[in-house]
């Protein structure tokens, strides 16, 4: 099987139900999700089984779900009956976020991305996720999309923030506070 088809040589690509320009908003949206998925794979590869087995399992599940997000955004025509991203996915992310937050030390100020290599990579995931979310919002303003993808991406960036803090905490590396930050987070 050849991995090259030559069908995109003139700047067009296939989507579910047709072809579009490679710089189409639809391709930008699911392409950003694909980029995010690569960084999630990198984060998973930095997650040793002994310390981060639970986190690695979560990241590998997220990779599957990011493919689902991309698939849901790849339709030329609305196809609700085929959507893979459901409210339950965001609800599960919330449970994971809550679990990570309960493990992490209290947070009062903004923090700088970084710390351990795993935490730094998870912060990259967070920022790429925010871009993917912005691209999906743009697409949603142009055509009808599965709104659950927006909810999922919004929650997922929060997950990456909490998981990055967990990665630092488990390695006993303190998050670095932004020095000019006021206290912006309340501890509940």
Image (cartoon, helix red, strand yellow):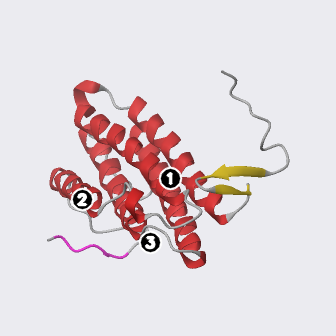
- The quadrant of the image that shows the C terminus is bottom left
Dot 2 corresponds to which residue?
88
Instruction: Tell me how far mark 2 sits from mark 3, CA to CA.
Output: 38 Å
Which residue extends farthest right?
A: 10
Q: Nearer the viewer, residue 80 or 124?
A: 80
Q: Residue 155's spot in the image, x, y percent?
A: 34, 63
Q: Is residue 171 visible?
A: no
Label 3, on which residue? 180
Which residues are the magenta region? 182-187
Q: Quadrant of residue 88?
A: bottom left
Residue nearest the viewer, comparing 70 with 116: 70
Which residue in the protein does label 1 denote? 70
Question: Quick one: label 3, few (<14), some, or many (20+) residues within 10 Å?
Answer: few
Q: Position of residue 143 (x, y in %)?
A: 57, 74
Mark closer to the chain start, 3 or 1: 1
| Left or right placement of residue 158 versus residue 77 in this view | left
* Residue displayed at 56% across by 66% down: 77
How many labels sit on residues? 3
Identify the secondary structure beneath mark 3: loop
Q: Which mark is residue 41?
A: none
Q: Position of residue 85 (x, y in %)?
A: 36, 57
């Amino acid at each position: 099987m050849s991995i090259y088809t030559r069908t995109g040589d003139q700047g067009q690509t296939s989507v579910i139900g047709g072809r579009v320009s490679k710089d189409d908003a639809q391709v930008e949206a699911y392409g950003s999700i694909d980029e995010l998925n690569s960084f999630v794979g990198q984060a998973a590869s930095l997650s040793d089984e002994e310390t981060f087995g639970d986190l690695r399992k979560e990241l590998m599940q997220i990779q599957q779900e990011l493919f689902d997000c991309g698939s849901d955004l790849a339709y030329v025509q609305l196809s609700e009956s085929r959507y893979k991203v459901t409210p339950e996915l965001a609800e599960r992310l919330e449970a994971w976020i809550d679990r990570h937050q309960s493990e992490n030390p209290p947070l009062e100020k903004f923090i700088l991305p970084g710390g351990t290599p795993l935490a730094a990579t998870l912060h990259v995931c967070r920022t790429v996720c925010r871009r993917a979310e912005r691209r999906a919002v743009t697409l949603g303003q142009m055509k009808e999309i599965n709104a659950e993808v927006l909810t999922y991406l919004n929650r997922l960036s929060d997950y990456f923030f909490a998981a990055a803090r967990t990665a630092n905490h488990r390695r006993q590396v303190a998050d670095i506070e932004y020095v000019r930050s006021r206290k912006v987070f309340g501890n509940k």
